[in-house]
Image (cartoon, rainbow, N blue to C red):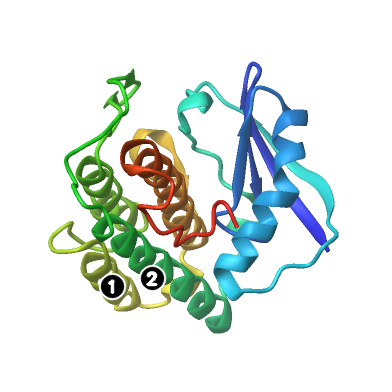
Amino acid sequence: MKINCVWEHNGNDSILYASNFPGAFTRGASKEEALQKMPEEIRRFQRWQSGISPKDYDMEIVQEKESDLQIRDADSDVLFISEEEPLRVEEYQHLKSLAMKSAEDFHALYHSFPDKNKSALPFRKTFYGSVPRTAEEMYQHTKNVNEYYFAEVGAKADNEGTIVSCRARGFEALESIAGFLSLEVVTGSYGEQWSVRKMLRRFIWHDRIHAKAMYRMGMATFGPDAIPDIFGFTR
């Protein structure tokens, strides 16, 4: 199976995205390190998505973006060339279902924590402030991009309720926009370019980053068998 990779980097720091598996990504101190991690990331992503994963992958870098952002902290502003294309109804429904599954699984992971305000992680700061340490902080941070992401493509949303409910309302708002599947690429906040395809990918990607961090924190804080591996990060 061919994996089309988009490489975003700042100096030696790299993020590699699988553009034909929206949300799948690896990070590394070099392109080579990120590439080495990609086959296992795709296997795990596909098992989470459908329970099925091929054994062999052929990876090709199809796009490169040199960035001024803090790649090591998973900051990103890349727009994939493939994300400039209009969506077909079937594609949208598939990506929407993945974004909702991701929200539901993130919500379930959060609720599995015996203490949502306990963490073994040290305090750390990045470009956006203190890194979320507890399950509660990680959940609120991940949920609260909802209004921002939808607003970038012109849909009025909010961050109220659960990550599942506010995301579902956001999709309802998006779908009320005439011709939403063919909306043009727009320049949004901070000069970043957005499309509906990119927004869908960003939701899954952002969930996956923080779900992995939450799961690892849970194992470190409560023990290796205390938190369910809902996203399949270790299977």
How far apart marks 1 and 2 lie (CA) works out to 7 Å
Q: Say which element carries label 1.
A: helix
Relative to 65, residue 98 above or below = below
220, 100: nearer the viewer: 220
Label 1, residues with CA under 10 Å away: few <14, some 14-19, many ≥20: some
Question: x, y (%) of residue 31?
Answer: 73, 29
Question: x, y (%) of residue 27?
Answer: 60, 34
Q: CB of mark 1 within 8 Å of CB of mark 2? A: yes
Q: Earlier in the sequence, mark 1 or mark 2?
A: 2
The residue tagged 1 is 168
216, 168: nearer the viewer: 216
Q: Is residue 83 left or right of residue 32?
A: left
Which residue type carries mark 2? Answer: Met
Question: x, y (%) of residue 203?
Answer: 42, 56
Q: Who's the residue at 23% across and 72% down the image? A: 169
Question: x, y (%) of residue 209?
Answer: 45, 44
Report the disc number at residue 100.
2
Q: Say which element carries label 2.
A: helix
